Image (cartoon, rainbow, N blue to C red):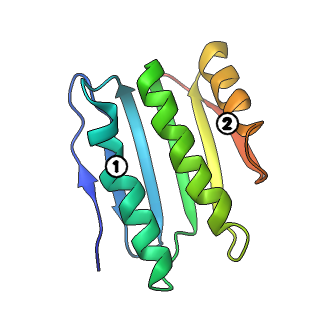
């Protein structure tokens, strides 16, 4: 089975696919030099999993910072999830640090471009 895990760096988020509960978590700072190269394998993994009948059940996004180029790639992830949600439900969670209204607003703006539901949760920054 094709899965993906990436360790966080100063410029890239942690990506962790948990095969046991079919969940994906992307968290941290996302400002890679080449956002397309960073996010393309994640998008391909989600698509390949779905094509084999093994779709994700949950995706959690928790960004400390999201560059413009990363936002465009996260939108591509949203588009794939939007397609999957036509046949199988994927629970999507947008977590943001306490009082980080900019990151909450980013999630709200992205959500306006798709047709699935997403929960928003403020988390303690500690």
**Outermost residue toward the bottom in this view:** 53
Counting residues from the start of the chain, the first of labels 2 and 1 encountered is 1
* Residue 91 x %, y %: 66, 60
Tell me whether the residue at label 2 lies in contact with that at label 1, contact meaning CB atoms closer than 8 angstroms.
no
Q: Could you say which is closer to the camera, residue 39 or residue 5?
A: 39
Tell me where residue 7 sits by quadrant.
top left
Asked if residue 60 is positioned above or below residue 27 in the image, the reply reads below
Alpha carbon separation for disc pair 2 and 1 = 26 Å
Q: Can you say which quadrant of the picture contains the C terminus?
A: top left
Residue depicted at x 28% and y 60%: 4
* Residue 105 x %, y %: 69, 21
Q: Could you say which is closer to the camera, residue 87 or residue 62?
A: 87
- The dot on residue 103 is none
Determine whether the residue tagged by mark 2 lies in a helix, strand or loop.
Answer: strand
Asked if residue 13 lies left or right of residue 24, the reply is left
The residue carrying mark 1 is 40
The residue carrying mark 2 is 121
* Residue 9 x %, y %: 20, 30
Residue depicted at x 47% and y 71%: 22
């Amino acid at each position: 089975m094709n899965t993906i895990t990436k360790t966080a760096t100063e410029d890239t988020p942690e990506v962790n696919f948990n095969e046991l509960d079919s969940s994906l978590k992307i968290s941290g700072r996302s400002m890679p030099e080449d956002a397309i190269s960073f996010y393309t394998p994640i998008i391909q993994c989600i698509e390949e999993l779905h094509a084999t009948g093994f779709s994700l059940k949950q995706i959690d996004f928790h960004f400390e910072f999201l560059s413009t180029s990363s936002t465009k790639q996260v939108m591509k992830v949203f588009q794939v999830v939007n397609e999957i949600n036509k046949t199988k439900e994927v629970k999507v969670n947008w977590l943001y640090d306490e009082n980080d209204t900019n990151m909450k607003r980013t999630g709200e703006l992205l959500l306006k471009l798709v047709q699935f539901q997403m929960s928003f949760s403020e988390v303690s920054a500690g």
